[in-house]
Amino acid sequence: MGVRGLLIFAALFTVSSSQFVPPYTEDCRSNMYPPKGPTFRAAVKWYTVDLDLPPSKRWTALITDKKAELVAMIQAIVDLADAFVPSGRLVELVDRTLPLMAETLPKPFGEEIKGIAATSGVPLGEVVLFNIFYEVFTVCTSVVAEDRNGHLIHGRNLDFGLFLGWDVKNKSWIISEKLKPLVVNLEFKRDNQTVFKSTNFAGYVGMLTGIKPHKFTLTMNERFSLDGGYIGILEWILGSRDGMWMSFLTRSVLENANSYQEAKARLSLTKLLAPAYFILGGNQTGQGAIITRSRTLSLDILELDLKLGRWYVLETNYDHWKEPFFLDDRRTPAMTCMNKTTQQSISVMTVYDMLSTKPILNKLTTYTTLMQVSEGKLESYIRDCPDPCMPW
Ligand SMILES: *[C@@H]1O[C@H](CO)[C@@H](O)[C@H](O)[C@H]1NC(C)=O
Ligand SMILES: *[C@@H]1O[C@H](CO)[C@@H](O)[C@H](O)[C@H]1NC(C)=O
Ligand SMILES: *[C@@H]1O[C@H](CO)[C@@H](O)[C@H](O)[C@H]1NC(C)=O
Ligand SMILES: *[C@@H]1O[C@H](CO)[C@@H](O)[C@H](O)[C@H]1NC(C)=O
């Protein structure tokens, strides 16, 4: 069952005290795009991050704008920690020890995080915590599909907050709800030119979702394993620092790699602190891959192969050659909808339909992002999952 199964069981106990948890599956949705109606929130705002500024200044405009939301989200984490270990000891530990960690983070991330702490007034240790947090609590769905004209569409749901405080009254995850107002689209510029774009949470400096226009698209999904993030982070604290933080690698690849091939090589070969799935799309037919990583090795690369009928690759949080955990199977419904759609009809609209079908859309889903490499386009939507809806 593994670590992830245990976490799901823990979540099941948390949630089932207030709500019966059947598998809320439904028929594949259609005509969901463009998003509208009661669950449509205001458009996700765009911000520019200027890479020519010193790292400590790059996030000032964004954080000044999102300060209240960032403080509220971090406060919710602090409240949870206090509920978990009363007396405030846990938060005290975070405030005292994690600032030291900011000093050890690779350039420019430590400086950027310090800049965010200074602008928001949130204690440095708590901003560091937020930046290493996703390690444990993300669940996601990513897909790269090729349409009949050879154009690639990359879509993803970012689900975050598993087991982080179930709000009995609202039937929602406290942290997931607090993250939604922090969802932003970013345009990273150098010499006044776009380098890449991403969907992010304000205050978070790594990348989970991004596009290098006309070159490649990239998302990262969490991969659970016993030799997982905890051990890697512990080693980092103890001074063994040859592994790379996963979302710092994705950011560095978006910033520096210039082709699908180069991105694929770096994502496959760089030593990591924790296992991960990288979902990479290129700009030409056949260029789409799921890279399954252990900390040291690329275990498997599954690529598009039209001759074999593989016109899309899809990843949730389980190795594609294994069965997903029975209480957390988003892969089968997602593939069912993709197969029903067929390559003839795949488009940004039908990918959005698939990502709007429960339980691929669930109570942890914070945003959906759709990327079209040939157009250089990224669009994202904050998501709410109307009841009845699976908690994950
Ligand atoms: C729960 O719902 C109420 C009313 O809709 C809202 O004011 C409140 O902020 C929600 N709580 C959380 C934690 O999202
Ligand atoms: C940057 O580019 C924008 C539009 O592309 C232009 O309006 C602006 O003047 C440029 N700024 C500088 C400093 O070159
Ligand atoms: C695809 O990417 C390669 C490598 O960066 C680039 O040379 C090529 O021009 C791109 N093709 C298109 C159609 O944008
Ligand atoms: C979807 O189609 C692929 C390719 O034909 C097949 O391998 C897979 O089992 C199908 N999955 C589902 C859930 O229908």
Image: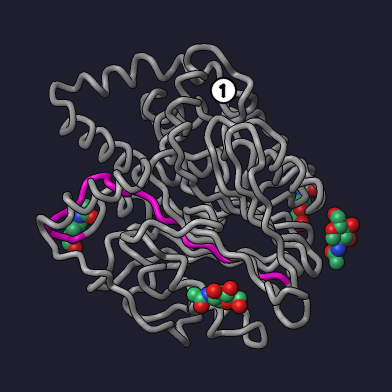
Q: Nearer the viewer, residue 373 or 23?
A: 23
239 part of magenta stretch: no
- The residue drawn where x is 55% and y is 43% is 276
Image position, residue 39 (x, y; %): 34, 73
Q: Does the magenta portion include 153?
A: yes
Q: Relative to residue 370, is residue 18 drawn left or right?
A: left
Residue that badge 1 annotates: 105
Quarter holding residue 388 = bottom left
SS at mark 1?
loop
Q: Is residue 382 above or below residue 267?
A: below
Q: Residues within 10 Å of mark 1 (few under 14, many from 20)?
A: some
Q: Which one is in front, 366 or 332?
A: 332
Find residue 119 and report its horizontal and vertical position in percent: 46, 31
Left or right of residue 277, residue 77 in this image? left
Q: On screen, 263 above or below 390?
A: above
Q: What is the x, y in percent for residue 206? A: 56, 39
Which contiguous range is marked in magenta?
A: 152-171
Q: Residue 329: x, y in percent?
A: 39, 63
- Asked if residue 212 shows in the view, the reply is yes
Numbered marks: total? 1
Residue depicted at 30% across the width and 54% down the height: 177
